[in-house]
């Protein structure tokens, strides 16, 4: 156990200091330990603001020396496990004391022992007197640019729990699961702990995992049969599958060959690959001999809307990330014009809550490109999400009675004839 806790502390450190995604790094953990490690790391990341601002300051009065800063990450994990998980108290403390010995020395081990025992003694008081939410100072700075305090508070309630599992079904197929809910926008929602491989239709390829917000974007298009669609930044392929299922002829482009291979595996399982071409390329430098009827730009972004599934984002993203991604989005949008047919459509989507990557990005683009018009998105299912311009701004609280949804932005632009 000690060695595992020490390993998890190193993983947490790399997530928080190097910006490595938990999704990408957890595959390095042994299969037999992955379930517990994922729960521990996710719980710690969800509760980290509380632990950093209210819990540890009560018991750690001096800054931990840089050469022993792994103790800081052991304490984050240990505090989360003591306060929010069901591991026996003696086992938790012993494990982190041993891990501290492995990573530092007996003084570090004694320090961890004292802090965790104090947290344990005051556990009930700490939890009942809690004042902080879940978003970090930097994350709040991003949101405060665009949202009221009340809107942010509503968003934050979805940071505490594991989100449910959303599925998109192929046309002509309906879910058979009794314990799920059909959302107003057509996604099928199952409890968070549902095992994907045990859901009816997995081997037959009649559905794929896709957050309900992400699934809305392609549904804003009509009559896709035979349309030539360029799917930029396509992996992992949820929207690609929607396009193919609706009859489009798709060229899927992604900069990562690994992610593109995963897309192909997903499409093969779904038996939708007949009209698919995949190309590993940087969207900024991609060229083609044809003009496309539709360009789907699932733009690289700060991903701030995915904090429910990726709680590390609440602690690693800053305004600098938003500005950097907005600049990249603008370049890809400009490049997309050269690939689009006259009368063609750009479907722009981001999983960002920042309006610099959504509403303002689109308004700036339209000011400099009067040859494009907004095609207003107006459906009964998305009425509460529609902006005054005709875009969709999807907030986590959009389906509060269904345990939330990812934050998302969608715009449809048409090039004039």
Image (cartoon, helix red, strand yellow):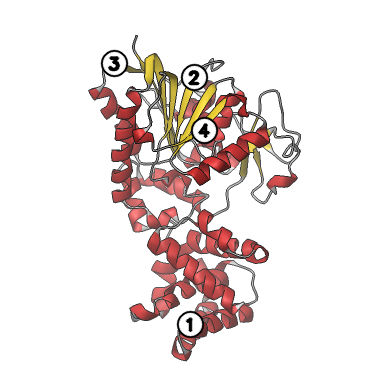
Describe residue 195's horizontal placement relative to residue 349 as left or right: right
For residue 107, say whether it is visible: yes
**Which numbered disc flags the more N-terminal residue, 2 or 1?**
1
Q: Position of residue 343 (x, y in %)?
A: 38, 12
Q: Quadrant of the N terminus?
A: bottom right
The extreme left residue here reads: 368
> For mark 1, what is the residue?
112
101 sits to left or right of 179: left
Vertical order, 9 against 112 (above or below): above
Marks 2 and 4 sit apart, C-alpha to C-alpha, by: 13 Å
State the image coordinates of residue 34 (x, y, percent, origin top left). 62, 62
Residue that mark 3 sits on: 371
Circle 2 sits on which residue? 228
Q: Nearer the viewer, mark 1 or mark 4?
A: 4
Q: Position of residue 277 (x, y in %)?
A: 53, 29
Image quadrant holding the C terminus, namely top left
Q: SS for tag 2?
A: strand
Q: Position of residue 213 (x, y in %)?
A: 52, 36
Q: Callout 2 environment at 10 Å: few (<14), some (14 to 19), or many (20+)?
A: many
Q: Say if mark 1 contacts mark 4, CB within 8 Å.
A: no
**First reached walking from the N terminus: tag 1 or tag 3:** 1
Q: Residue at x 61, y 33 (%)?
A: 187
**Alpha-carbon span between mark 3 and mark 2:** 21 Å
The image quarter containing residue 2 is: bottom right
Q: Which residue lies under the disc numbered 4?
A: 278
Pointer 2 with pointer 1, Cβ within 8 A: no
> Can residue 130 be spotted in the picture?
no
Q: Which mark is residue 246?
A: none
Which of these two is toward me, 122 or 298?
298
Residue at image location 46% in from the left, 88% down from the top: 105
| Disc 3 versus disc 4: nearer the observer | 4
């Amino acid at each position: 156990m000690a060695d595992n806790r020490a390993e998890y502390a190193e993983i947490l450190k790399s997530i928080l200091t190097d910006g490595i995604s938990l999704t990408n790094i957890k595959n390095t953990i042994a299969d037999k330990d992955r379930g517990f490690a994922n729960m521990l790391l996710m719980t710690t990341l969800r509760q980290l603001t509380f632990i950093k601002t209210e819990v540890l300051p009560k018991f750690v009065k001096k800054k931990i020396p840089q050469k022993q800063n792994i103790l800081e990450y052991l304490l984050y994990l240990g505090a989360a496990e003591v306060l929010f998980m069901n591991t026996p108290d003696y086992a938790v403390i012993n494990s982190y004391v041993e891990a501290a010995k492995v990573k530092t020395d007996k003084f570090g081990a004694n320090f961890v022992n004292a802090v965790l025992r104090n947290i344990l003694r005051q556990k009930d008081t700490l939890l009942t007197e809690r004042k902080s939410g879940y978003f970090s100072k930097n994350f709040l700075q991003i949101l405060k640019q665009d949202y009221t305090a009340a809107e942010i508070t509503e968003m934050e309630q979805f940071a505490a729990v594991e989100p449910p599992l959303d599925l998109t079904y192929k046309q002509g197929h309906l879910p058979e699961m009794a314990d799920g809910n059909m959302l107003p926008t057509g996604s099928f929602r199952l409890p968070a702990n549902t095992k994907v491989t045990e859901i009816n239709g997995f081997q037959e390829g009649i559905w794929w995992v896709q957050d309900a917000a992400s699934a809305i974007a392609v549904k804003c298009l009509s009559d896709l049969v035979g349309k030539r669609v360029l799917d930029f930044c396509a992996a992992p392929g949820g929207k690609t599958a929607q396009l193919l299922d609706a009859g489009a002829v798709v060229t899927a482009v992604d900069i990562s060959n690994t992610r593109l291979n995963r897309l192909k595996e997903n499409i093969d399982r779904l038996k939708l690959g007949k009209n698919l071409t995949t190309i590993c390329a940087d969207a900024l430098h991609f060229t083609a001999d044809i003009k496309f009827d539709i360009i789907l730009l699932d733009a690289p972004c700060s991903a701030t809307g995915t904090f429910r599934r990726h709680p590390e984002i609440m602690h690693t993203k800053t305004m600098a990330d938003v500005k950097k991604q907005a600049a990249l989005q603008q370049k890809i949008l400009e490049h997309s014009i050269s690939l689009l047919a006259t009368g063609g459509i750009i479907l722009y989507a981001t999983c960002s809550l920042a309006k610099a990557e959504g509403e303002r990005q689109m308004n700036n683009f339209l000011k400099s490109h009067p040859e494009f018009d907004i095609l207003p998105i107006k459906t009964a299912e998305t009425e509460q999400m529609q902006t005054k311009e005709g875009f969709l701004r999807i907030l986590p609280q959009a389906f509060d009675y269904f345990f939330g949804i990812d934050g998302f932005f969608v715009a449809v632009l048409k090039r004039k004839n």
